Amino acid sequence: MHNTKYVFVTGGVTSSLGKGIIAASLAKLLQERGYSVTIQKLDPYINIDPGTLNPYEHGECYVTDDGAETDLDLGHYERFLNIPTSQANNVTTGRIYQSVINKERRGEFLGKTVQVIPHITDEIKRRIQRLGKTGKFDIVITEIGGTVGDIESLPYVESVRQLQWELGQENAIVIHLTLVPYLAAAGELKTKPTQHSVKMLMQSGVAPNILVCRTEHEINDNIKRKLALFCNVKTQDVIQSIDAETIYDVPNLMFDEGLDRVVLEKLQLSSEKQPKLIAWNQFLRKHKNPKSTIEIALIGKYVELHDSYKSITEAFIHAGATNETKVKVRWIHSEELTPENVLGKLKGVNGILVAPGFGERGIEGKIKAVQYAREQNIPFLGICLGMQMAVIEYARNVLGLAAANSTEMDLKTKNPVIDLMEEQKTITDKGGTMRLGAWDCKLDKNSKVFDAYKTAMISERHRHRYEFNNQYFDALTKAGLKATGVNPDTGLVEIIELPNHPWFVGVQYHPEYKSTVLNPHPLFVSFVKAALEQSV
């Protein structure tokens, strides 16, 4: 029988220590050693998924091939491991409770009183082990969101305690990520926050097997010994995680610290095969030693929180390395773009990306940015809403339909060149009801996108309710806007281009979701290359 091993990553002292990056880096090292690994995220919030959360509240909502709206950490997992995630890789408290309550309504608990223990914890354990029981993975790494001591995290920590007891310590281990702060006034690193964090975890019945200590300064052997003594671990199990120049350095840093070796030892797995990270380090060398620099304007509605566009900025890093170019992002809030200042705000950029989003706020600024890119022959990429704005701009300023708009912004527009998808018109629930996940698209062989993808059929991930209105297809085509990608089953226009422009592409889907370190997205690679050529 296939015996899957489980690694749990918890966090203490403060949030945003980088549990997702540590989990992804460990997974990368284990993958390089020949093990089949996946990562899942347990999110303690009661929302069913982040699909209805404001980007300012939660950052980007990441979408998987099978249509799950998930936490942005799943993007890190895919970018590091180069394998797709799924619905099973992101679990929320909302999903757990929804499932248990549905079972209770169906009478599956035979009249018993439904309680956090055992019913909620049983459901959590079932979800944790779902990926392991597929037989596809040697190791499943589970990141538990939030910090130890959070009320909402308690059922997850209790589930880990039960699983360790049920599976045995050699099959389920806990890595606790914690902060070792530096007090400048005292001139020293402080271990007390970590001691208290571990103490709180142990009060819940879980003793960490490995400590990963986030720090701005080197942790010496004396501090490691002190932490080991007070936290009930061996000195070799205290791993330093010092601030890195880039998240892509972390696998190398964790290898140097021996995190993967210690994990394999505790799971009683062989550590003979050494990680090489050859392709990974080739990417890193190119990323850190660019031969040129370009600046691309990112026009968005949530630019105050850069995590709202996390996959896009990471895709620029991957595509930049491929082109041996540093991509600087000029963040521009679309609400602040006006006809009077558009020239000043966009002057000097080598490319313009109009980002995804929802609602009417900041729309006219996005349209102005598209117009500037089109008229000034600046390489342009419009993603989802950005593609829709390109269609509206062209309909207004070239086709002459001054009232052209999307019914998302103006329900009574005379020229709805973008309209609500037919199957969306009867839907009232907001969560998980959009066109989600991977859909096929057939490319025109005489197009920029075909030159980029080098294949006639692609599959890309979607997240939208509105689409190109095919009633305007002929008029827009005659006016020079070319549909170069169409869904073969529905006839939905997925991609538009301007043939007489150096590089002008709008896509209804989200190419950024599929860009990884080892497979940079071809559309971003092509866009960056076009921007680079324009900058010379």
Image (tube, rainbow, N blue to C red):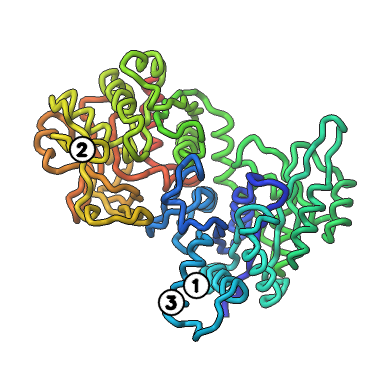
What kind of residue is marked 3?
Arg
List x then y, in percent, for residue 451: 29, 38
Categorize mark 3 by other alpha carbons within 10 Å: few (<14), some (14-19), many (20+).
Answer: few
Q: Give the residue number, with chain letter if any, for mark 2.
A: 446
What kind of residue is marked 1?
Val
SS for callout 1 = helix
Q: Is residue 519 visible?
A: yes
Categorize mark 1 by other alpha carbons within 10 Å: few (<14), some (14-19), many (20+).
Answer: many
Q: Is residue 303 above or below residue 237?
A: above
Say which quadrant the N terminus sits in: bottom right
Marks 2 and 1, how far apart at CA? 53 Å
Horizontal side of residue 411 vs 478, given as left or right: right
Q: Give the residue number, with chain letter if any, for mark 3.
A: 105
Whichever of labels 2 and 3 marks the residue nearer the N terminus, that label is 3
List x then y, in percent, for residue 263: 71, 61
What kind of residue is marked 2?
Asn
Marks 3 and 1, how far apart at CA? 9 Å
Q: Give the residue number, with chain letter if any, for mark 1.
A: 100
SS for callout 2 = loop
Q: Nearer the viewer, residue 32 or 409?
A: 409
Horizontal side of residue 335 vs 471, given as left or right: right
